[in-house]
């Protein structure tokens, strides 16, 4: 029997904004359902530190449904920490069922985990309509390499695994002793490893020259932000709604 069951599969969505694509997932608090993702998916120049999203901003994002992209108007909720790569969207209405999804209260050093998403915009179409017309995400396995650490980007834990473009914003889950899936956090990227490639070229004068080209490769260490950071944002939203 698969450890990945419908109570997480049905919550995972292929999301898009302008020319970028990624993954999002639903979560509830009190009476509201929210869509969680990685902030950089919705920031065209995030890598240049040109941040445009604002708290309370209305945004039109895309969800893949019934084999096409459909528009959804949402409200952005961000952390006070501008370095944190999480966005929590307030939804106009539920987009998934409210299946039971416990959150991780304790991380276990070296335990197996899984992350779900849509690498390179690939998906498994819901031809059987078991997932309300939404595509099924890909699943990849990982190992919890560290317990949550305080970083400039928030409370982050690291995973041994290989994350691909498109998984950003997807949920990281762990299986508890009772067989239940528990939400550990949101996958945001990987630790970049610098590498060098040597190449040769011939100048106009016929002289052979050698140069080095620096590049950044996937180290195999996944970065994930703790589920507690998600609820810090949601708690702030709900406190403001009460005033």
Image (tube, rainbow, N blue to C red):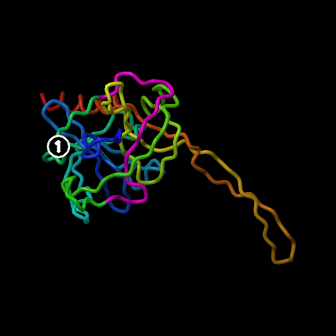
Number of marks: 1
Secondary structure of the residue carrying tag 1 is: loop
Q: Quadrant of residue 119?
A: bottom left
Can you say whether 70 is above or below 3 in the image? below
Q: Which residue is pictured at 23% across the width and 28% down the height?
A: 235
Q: Position of residue 141 (x, y in %)?
A: 46, 42
Quadrant housing the N terminus: top left
Report the front residue among 76 and 229. Answer: 229
Say which residue appears at 42% left-offset and 24% top-offset.
107
Q: Answer left or right for 158 relative to 9.
A: right
Nearer to the camera, 24 or 232: 24
Residue span colored magenta: 103-124
Give the percent coordinates (x, y) of residue 204: 81, 78
Q: Give yes or no for residue 110 being in the magenta stretch.
A: yes
Residue that extends furthest to the front in the rendered view of this protein? 1
Q: Residue at the spot x=40%, y=37% of the render?
A: 84
In the figure, is residue 144 to the left or right of 88?
right
- Disc 1 target residue: 97
Q: Quadrant of the C terminus?
A: top left
Residue 218 percent across, percent down from the top left: 57, 48
Instruction: Judge by depth and name the residue closer to the eye, 94 or 241.
Output: 94
Left or right position of 121 against 102: right
Q: Is residue 181 left or right of residue 32?
A: right
């Amino acid at each position: 029997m698969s450890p990945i069951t419908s109570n997480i599969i049905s919550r995972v969505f292929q999301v898009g904004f302008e020319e970028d694509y990624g993954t999002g997932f639903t979560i509830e608090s009190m009476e509201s359902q929210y869509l969680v993702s990685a902030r950089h998916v919705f920031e065209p120049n995030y890598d240049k530190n040109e941040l445009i999203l604002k708290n309370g901003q209305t945004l039109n994002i895309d969800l893949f449904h019934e084999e096409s992209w459909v528009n959804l108007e949402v409200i952005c909720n961000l952390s006070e920490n501008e370095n944190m790569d999480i966005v929590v969207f307030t939804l106009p209405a539920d987009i998934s069922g409210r299946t039971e999804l416990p959150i991780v209260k304790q991380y276990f050093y070296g335990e197996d985990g899984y992350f779900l998403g849509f690498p390179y915009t690939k998906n498994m179409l819901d031809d059987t309509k078991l997932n309300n017309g939404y595509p099924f995400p890909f699943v990849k396995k990982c190992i919890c390499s560290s317990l949550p650490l305080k970083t400039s980007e928030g409370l982050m834990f690291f995973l041994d695994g290989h994350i691909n473009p498109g998984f950003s914003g997807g949920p990281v889950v762990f299986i508890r002793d009772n067989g239940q899936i528990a939400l550990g956090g949101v996958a945001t990227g990987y630790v970049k490893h610098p590498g060098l490639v040597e190449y040769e070229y011939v100048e106009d004068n016929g002289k052979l020259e050698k140069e080095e080209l620096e590049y950044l490769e996937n180290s195999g260490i996944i970065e994930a932000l703790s589920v507690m950071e998600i609820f810090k944002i949601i708690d702030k939203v709900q406190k403001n709604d009460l005033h």
